[in-house]
Image: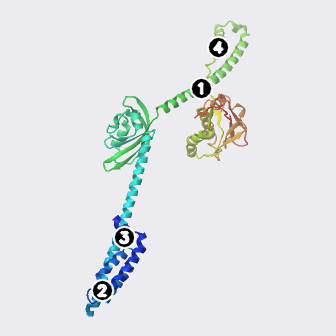
Amino acid sequence: MNDLLSVYAPKHRAPLLILAGLLIVAIAAIDWVTKPYVSLGFLYLFPIMLAGGFLKRSQTIAVALACAVLQEAFSNLPGSEAFIRLMLGSAGFAGTGLFISELIRNRQIVLRHVNELEEQERLRRDAEQELQSLVDTSPAAIITIDWSGRVVLANEAAHRLLASGALRGQTIRSYLPSLHTIVQTHSAKVLRTTLQCRGQRRSGEAFLAGVWFSTYTTLDGPRLAAIVVDLSDDLRNREDLSFEHLLRSTRILMSAVAHEIRNLCSAALVVHRNLAQIKEVQQNEDFQALRTLIQSLETVLSLELQPSPTPRAAAVELTSVFDEMRVLIDAAYGESQMEIDWRVPETLPLVLAERYGLIQVFLNLAKNSQRAMQTTETKRLRVIVTEEGQTVSIRFEDTGIGVESPEGLFHPFQAGAVSTGLGLYVSRAIVRGFGGDLVYEARPHGCCFNIVLAVAVGVEVNA
């Protein structure tokens, strides 16, 4: 095929057409010279074959008709059958030329199709190699499971995570029972979802597995492809961090409670001294026991709790903190038909803070605003972040009912507060714990709380 197409290559068009024309002239001349003896008209087939590979159908028929006329003109056959011979010769020449034309055209189409298939095959191999490279070098475990729950494919990360050896052909039940159940019970459904489940290594060690998986159908039956990661460290870190902040908040709350009880004890001692001036009461045993109880309680309260360790100063990236905040509160505010106006610059300096505690303060202020706007017509929380010299101010402004007595906002156990009124007290203690401050700024309508944080310079970044 390639040899034939190389002869009829586009670059050979002009030379071959000239050659075909010269052959027609030569055959006609020789046929004219030998007219009384022999007819050479069949030789016109050769120039027709040369020209047919380049000419259009109409052009091929025209050349064939011209050759038939030349053949009949120099023929010594009877003239009564000239028309029939002319028609048959034209048909023969035209058929030969058209046959060559279609043959070349079809072979060109086949060759283009073959080239396309080869190109697609090359692209497919390249894609498979890239995909295989991606799977092999992925830090996450990637596995494919057939309908019986056996591993069809597993990358190196999967071997390290689950088996420390070959996984192919083994059942997934002993490693990730939930995936085996999904394959067995949902083989007819197409699933694309994620789950957290218990995983177990070949050594018997259990871990928390995060799995992103999808099911699909092949000629060999349904299969499941999954990406598996070990979330155990994240879970432990999250729980340790939560416990640490729980202890810190508990110490703050206990200090607030002790302070209030100490004030009550002081007042009770004053009353006791006043009553002690009455002679009839001085000798009363119950009165003396009451004094002992008050003094004992005061002694207990004077014992300071072990101070909580101050969070290590770290540079926190506010942009990522606000990204998490959007995820945490946007949906809740949307359900409450409340609008959040985020006025956060695209670039912000690093601030000196503690990431988890900062998020807790943000959430507390947002929830306070949400409660304050439940009965108002306009429900909008505006979060404004501004850089002011060596500090960054984060203001939470809402259109709520406002604050009647701002002077008591940050005092524990304030009257009229939700629950114990310790939210703002604890929030300010957390912010002050890493060198910042939480203050109230008066507004004509609604209320505004400003978190002031110091810009971090030369401090380790806290991810």
- Residue at 27% from the left image edge and 88% from the top image edge: 84
Identify the residue position indicated by label 4 in the image.
299
x and y, in percent, of residue 309 in the image: 61, 23
Mark 3 to mark 2: distance in Å?
Answer: 26 Å
In the depicted structure, whether residue 336 falls above or below residue 285:
below
* Mark 1–mark 2 CB contact (< 8 Å): no
The answer to which quarter of the image holds residue 272 is top right
**Mark 3: few/some/many CA within 10 Å (<14, 14-19, 20+):** some
Three-letter residue code for mark 2: Met
Three-letter residue code for mark 4: Thr
Q: Earlier in the sequence, mark 4 or mark 1?
A: 1
Mark 1 to mark 2: distance in Å?
Answer: 109 Å
Mark 1 to mark 3: distance in Å?
Answer: 84 Å
- Residue at 70% from the left image edge and 31% from the top image edge: 408
Q: Which quadrant is the N terminus positioned in?
A: bottom left
Dot 4: what SS?
helix
* In the foreground, 462 or 193: 462
